[in-house]
Amino acid sequence: MVRRHNRLLVTFHVATDALLGMVAFLLAYVIRFDSGLIPVTRGYPPIDQYLNILPFVAIVVPLGFHLQGLYRLRRGRSRIDDFFNVLVGSIFAVVLGVVSTLYFQAYYLPDELKDRGAYEVSQLVWGLFLVCNIALGYLSRKFIREALERRWIAGVGLRRVLIAGAGDLGRMVADKILEHRELGYQIVGFVDDRAGGDHLGYRGLPLLGSLGEAAEVAAREKVDHLYVALPLEEHMKLLDVVESTSREGVDVKVVPDLLQFIALRARLEDLDGVPVINLNDVPLQGVNAFVKRALDIAISFVALAIMFIPGLIIAWLIKRGSPGPAFYHQERMGLDGKQFSVYKFRTMPVTAEEGTGPVWADEDDPRCTPIGRWLRRHDLDEWPQFWNVLRGDMSIVGPRPERPFFVEQFKHRIPQ
């Protein structure tokens, strides 16, 4: 039933996209030639010439959206995902439309029609079509999503979910599903071999059987989706559950047990068809890293230029307030454990840490000089760190580089 419903919804999306694509193309023609908003300098092409292109548009729009994966229905997809997928899919459609019409005109069109430019399309029309198709494609999905979400919140058309595992991971999955009713899921309960104590009745959800009974429970409860949320030590049971329930036509989703790892930087890699989870991946690579570095250089350069004269005044006030240099440098640990010297305006006497050693900074640190207290209050003591950003030691946006003394404590108390 779920797969049949998906096929109907995909068919509806394809038909709607083809229709709206043709509407967007005609709307682009009207804006370009009939609205008077854009001057027509090279003649006024007849509407029939553009009507000839509509069959191509009706094909290339769904094809472009298919290439972008818009017909792989996923309830958890966000509106931002929808917009950017429609954007890229529409770009594909324009490229396919230009290529296909030029190819058809070059190889299949009679010479007399070629001379009349029967399949020629203004570049500006293609550009306006891109904008119109993005707007119509996104709005159609927005309206369909909102209509479906209203049905799901009202309890209509829900997909029944069984969770294998009633431990911390399974409970987390249950919490997420219960918090997002707009996804259209209804949890029927858990299956787990640990049948005692507080595993019964978590948030009103019953324990329906053991893991070995997952297939029977799924068939009895008419389950659409099985979320397998088992800890790593039950890996062999996970394989048995997946195999038995897959035979019942249940859509199986495996939730990896990464709770003991810091997976914020995890990335899925492909090793010749074998999925590999990289837990210590660098978030930005390639072009993204280049763009981030370029922004760091630009922002830090401008900030240092703006602060040059005020910085000289601050340095003079610091030296006037207490003996010692105006700038303070301290060893910090950056990317991959690389140590570097971070620069600040000095806010304390040079002998401040002789008796205490490294300690956490305090907002009302009594060791601060008067000018140092004012600098800290307005965060101006951090301004020289733009020099570190310009050098590449730090980034405008990124984790705080901490002192090696504290990093040595953190890596034992807080793994990863």
Image: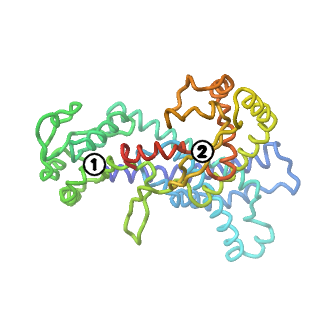
* Relative image position of residue 145 (x, y in whole percent): 46, 40
Please report the residue visible at 52 percent of the width from the left and 58 percent of the height from the top. 68
Residue at 68% x, 35% y: name it: 345
Q: Is residue 125 above or below residue 369?
A: below
Q: Which residue is mark 1?
A: 227
* Quadrant of res 248: bottom left
x and y, in percent, of residue 124 in the image:
76, 54
Mark positioned earlier in the residue sequence (1 or 2): 2
Q: Is residue 226 visible?
A: no
Q: Quadrant of residue 276?
A: bottom left
The residue that appears at 21% across and 33% down in the rendered structure is 202
User: Element under label 2?
Assistant: helix
- Compared across the picture, whether 113 is left or right of 71 comes to right
Q: Nearer the viewer, residue 106 or 198?
A: 198
Left/right of residue 222 with respect to residue 406 in the rendered view = left
Q: Which mark is residue 136?
A: 2
The 10 Å Cα crowd at callout 1, few under 14, some 14 to 19, many 20 or more, is many
State how many labels appear: 2
Amino acid at circle 2: Leu
Secondary element at image label 1? strand
